[in-house]
Amino acid sequence: MNHDTYDAIIIGAGIIGTAIGYELARKGRRTLNIDMLPAAGYGSTSNSCAIIRLYYSTLDGCAMAYDGYYYWKNWADYLQAPRDESLASFNECGTLIMKTKLNDGLRKQLVHLDALDIPYDHWTNEQILERYPFYDVSNFAPAKALDDPHFGEPTSGQLDGAIMFPKGGYISDPQFATRNIQLAAERVGATFRFNSRVKEIPTANGKVQGVVLEDGTRIDAPLVVNVAGPHSSQINALVGADRDMKISTRALRQEVTHLPAPGGIDYASFASVVSDSDAAVYTRPEMGRNILIGSEDPPCDAHVYVDPDNYDRNFSDQWTLQAQRLGQRFPGIGIPSNPKGCVDLYDVTEDWIPIYDRSCVDGFYLACGSSGNQFKNAPVAGKAMAALIEHCESGNDHDRQPMHYRLENVDREISLGTFSRLREVNQDSTFSVLG
Ligand SMILES: Cc1cc2nc3c(=O)[nH]c(=O)nc-3n(C[C@H](O)[C@H](O)[C@H](O)COP(=O)(O)OP(=O)(O)OC[C@H]3O[C@@H](n4cnc5c(N)ncnc54)[C@H](O)[C@@H]3O)c2cc1C
């Protein structure tokens, strides 16, 4: 029987899978991205809040985000796009991080940011109020459930100001950005196959052989990369790659709330991304004069881990809870009766740091566990994974001696050991979507 044959199969055509396909194709490999959905970026990427920010809990995490920032900033160059191509846009409105008891004024992270020369300004509460005159800067933490009789009551004191990172913002349309990368990848010879679900991953002598699709089609390749997002643990189980993993991945349900800005406020004209761990929400402008509200995962909220093929896509009380939490900071915000926003999944690891690694099955690689915070890093992940694959396929033992990847836009190397499947849970993490 004749089988299609490729040099590398990438399972998934989300923003990270597509970026990996692009980089492997640029290195001359015949690649195939396979996705069970009808187009690139239709999975969890499509509902990403697509925030570009530079602070993470580890130095390597911050360095990766800073490197990634430059690809978004110079998006047409990254894509080598023809002049007339329509591209997703980067709204560089900055990111404002409230200094709270919970994040200790970002003291730990600022050490990393200083090491990388990332610019930022300290803002007083007065400066916050100049930009957001409708804010109440009282403290409300610890976050509470909606039925807590003390919900919405100020606790003690006020925010301790904020930190403004001018380099940051959000991408207008994450699905369209993925489509941009798909076209760039196709220009350098990559291929994509949609509406096709990987059902089996055959191996021989401990080495991956390719994939078998739901309809029985077999496609051969000596390299297969798991970039299946919230389905990543299913894919790892298919090939036995989970045998030695110390870090696992699970699908975590998330709701994102969209609220109309109160009458007359042109929110997008002045607002930045705001991360507010005291109110336990992050916000950014959203199309149609709306405010997008995501959760910062406070401990009082249940983590709802689900089967990615069978979960409730309707809004729950969580939608209202996020709206009410913003209502503490922004008392004038109204809550309409018809909820808008989205329900989707993160692919979460124990320490909310992704896995970019090889696996115990030769030729089978992992780019998963993106934990709700890797959209911004997709271009870097694409390049780092392509470099890692070359490194391992040339006989290097990445598990014993983790490869260092030299960033292209920031004068620094990062250890890919930070993202190893064999790492201990990283205790420096925020254990939240902030990574
Ligand atoms: C609500 C939400 C908000 C977020 N906000 C941000 C943010 O502000 N900033 C940020 O940096 N990150 C954010 N993220 C995270 C970011 O969006 C993800 O890290 C990123 O999109 C993951 O991309 P991916 O390519 O790995 O996965 P996905 O986009 O999930 O793609 C995986 C693909 O694999 C396919 N697939 C799965 N199984 C199979 C199979 N068996 N056969 C074939 N195809 C298969 C799926 O159809 C899917 O298209 C957010 C995520 C969510 C859900």
Image (spheres, helix red, strand yellow):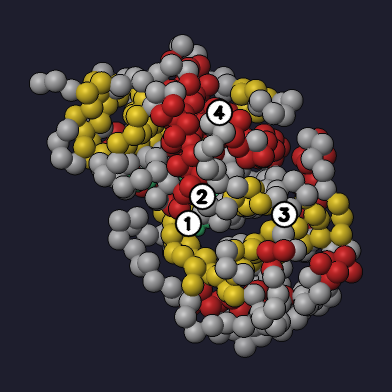
- Label 2, residues with CA under 10 Å away: few <14, some 14-19, many ≥20: many
Q: Amino acid at mark 1?
A: Asn
Q: Is mark 4 within 8 Å of ligand 1?
A: no
Q: Which residue is mark 3?
A: 93
Drawn side of residue 278 relative to residue 9, left or right: right
Label 2 CB less than 8 angstroms from ligand 1: yes
Who's the residue at 47% across and 56% down the image? Answer: 47
* Tag 2 near tag 3, CB within 8 Å: no
- Mark 3 vs mark 4: give the one in front: 4
Marks 2/4: CA–CA distance? 18 Å
Is tag 1's residue or tag 4's residue first in the polypeptide sequence? 1
Is residue 367 visible to us here?
no
- In primary-sequence order, the first of circles 2 and 1 is 1
Q: Is residue 389 visible?
A: yes
Quadrant position of residue 270: bottom right
The residue lying at 51 percent from left, 49 percent from top is 174
| Residue at 21%, 33% in the rendered image | 212
Residue 176 location (% of width, % of height):
48, 47
Q: Are marks 2 and 1 in contact (CB under 8 Å)?
A: yes
Residue with the mark numbered 1: 47
Q: Earlier in the sequence, mark 2 or mark 4?
A: 4
Q: Which residue type does callout 3 highlight?
A: Cys
Vertical position of residue 380 compared to residue 433: above or below:
above
Point out which mark residue 161 bears.
none
The residue that disc 4 covers is 80
The residue that mark 2 highlights is 174
